Amino acid sequence: MRNQKKYIFYVIILMCIAVTLFTSYYIHRGLHSHWYVRLYVSKLMPSNNNFVFLWIISLCLSSCSYLIINEEKQNILFELGETLYITLLFLCLIWPLGFFFLKSAVIGILILSLLLLTTFITSAVFFKISNSTLILMSGYIVILTFIFHTNLYIVLRTFNVIIR
């Protein structure tokens, strides 16, 4: 059963990276509709290509944290941490689908909010299992918070919620 979970974990990580790369390709090639072009994106925000690297770095940081807690299988919080981490990866998978392919910035920001909340809870559980995950998950939280705030800004500016 443990080997099966390990393979599921690796498949989900690879799927997350594949979805990230496909989304980058999708945006870079201009395959998106006029919906994406009409979104308000500040000139101060990094280009979409930089977000791909941020997602991949954040996935690597969280994966390293998972591998650290994987050594602590006897801990009573391990099953909870593993479940939360798989949930976190699932949310990483569906976020680009909600934002880019369903063409809904609101659904995208809701999924991203849920992802950020799940990340905070996962980080707390990982820290309870092993203190050495603190730096890795902190880096993941910083990157994810940056991505969340840039997307929130896009949504709020697009729907004219922020007054100039």
Image: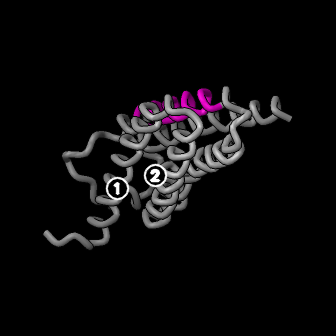
Mark 2: few/some/many CA within 10 Å (<14, 14-19, 20+): some
Residue 12 locus on image (x, y percent):
67, 38
The quarter of the picture where the C terminus appears is bottom left
The dot on residue 32 is 2
What span is colored magenta in the figure? 53-69
Residue 62 lies in the magenta-colored region: yes
Q: In this view, does 76 lie above or below 109?
A: above
Q: In which quarter of the image is residue 66?
A: top right
Q: What residue type is labelled 1?
A: Val
* Residue at horizontal 54 percent and vertical 55 percent from the top: 101
Mark 1: few/some/many CA within 10 Å (<14, 14-19, 20+): few
Q: Is residue 164 above or below residue 84?
A: below
Residue 118 locus on image (x, y percent):
53, 53
Q: Quadrant of residue 8?
A: top right
In terms of secondary structure, where does tag 1 sit? Answer: helix
Q: Which tag, 1 or 2, sits closer to the chain's start?
A: 2
Residue 133 locus on image (x, y percent):
50, 32
Q: Is the magenta stretch mostly helix, strand or loop?
A: helix
* Residue at horizontal 44 percent and vertical 56 percent from the top: 33
Contact? badges 1 and 2 (CB < 8 Å):
yes
The quarter of the picture where the N terminus appears is top right
Q: In this view, does 9 lie above or below 125?
A: above
How far apart, in angstroms, are the residues tagged by discs 1 and 2? Answer: 8 Å
In terms of secondary structure, where does tag 2 sit? Answer: loop
Residue 65 lies in the magenta-colored region: yes
* Residue at horizontal 54 percent and vertical 61 percent from the top: 102
* Residue at horizontal 63 percent and vertical 48 percent from the top: 84
Residue 45 locus on image (x, y percent):
25, 45
Q: Mark 1 points at which residue?
A: 37
Q: Which amino acid does label 2 sit on?
A: His
